[in-house]
Amino acid sequence: MSATDQFTLLGREAHRHWRAERINWLVLTGIVLLLLLTIAGLWAVLYLQSVERPYVEVRGYRFADEATFQEFLRQGDNRARFAEFTTFLRESDVDMELIPPQDLLRQGSDWLRIHEPPFALPPREDWPNIVATLRLVRDEVVPNTGPVLVVSAYRTARYTRKVGGSATSHHRNFCSVDLVPKSNISRRELVNELQTMHVRIGAESRAGLGIYGDVRFHIDTCGYRRW
């Protein structure tokens, strides 16, 4: 083999070796990038999971958490007004352990979707409207359904409008509450208990009862009716 042929053969071997090394580096680079993307994806998932959500979810409903309520109290004179409201309830013979005062400031479960505050303080002149309703919940509803959570009580006109509520809704004048049972009572059992109760207490109670598509239900004392 001539020197020229040997040189050519060596050149070809060197080229093949270079191509093989190049492919190896490309594969290695691809693997490293894939690993980095995987790590970044896992980090993003863990980060999102670690971000504190402003609510807790119960039976499919989003309840604004304690931190969100404390933020609400820091706004304007809300803390002082809430203290006055709590004193009013304490003096009105209602069970504040059964339904804590702050729960009565919940506007509803759609607050995130409609970009409205989850809490609102009703006007002072409307405070007496809720007393009979709370006593009805204590004396008649809870003994039949078990403990309940308030999904919605007072609502502002703006919140009511955004959720498509009626302008004459009794949430507006702080006479009604929407509730869900804390227990795993079935809808069928819940409907039976509530309707039986409503018939038993009669028109004298002025109880309004509404039952929605799941286990959420409405109670007020602004007129005897059922839907």
Image: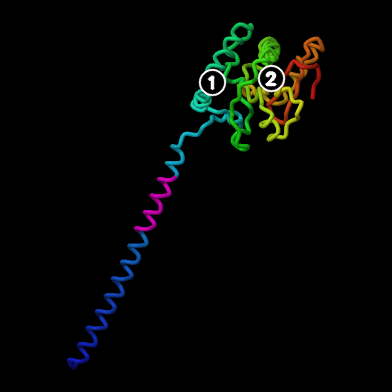
x, y percent for residue 202: 81, 12
Task: Tell which of 98 and 176 is nearer to you.
Answer: 176
Q: Is residue 133 visible?
A: yes
Which mark is first along the chain, 1 or 2? Answer: 1
x, y percent for residue 222: 76, 17
Magenta stretch: give its range: 32-44
Going by the image, does 6 lie left or right of 191? left
Task: Indicate yes or no whether the magenta region holds residue 58.
Answer: no
Count neighbours of disc 1 (C-alpha within 10 A) and say few if under 14, some if 14 to 19, many if 20 or more: few
Which residue is labeled 2 in the image? 174
Which residue is labeled 1 in the image? 77
Task: Tell which of 103 and 188 is nearer to you.
Answer: 103
x, y percent for residue 226: 80, 21
Residue drawn at x 78%, y 13% is 206
Q: How has the structure been colored for display?
A: rainbow
Task: Tell which of 16 and 66 is nearer to you.
Answer: 66
**Secondary structure beneath label 1:** loop
Amino acid under disc 1: Asp
Q: Is residue 141 visible?
A: no
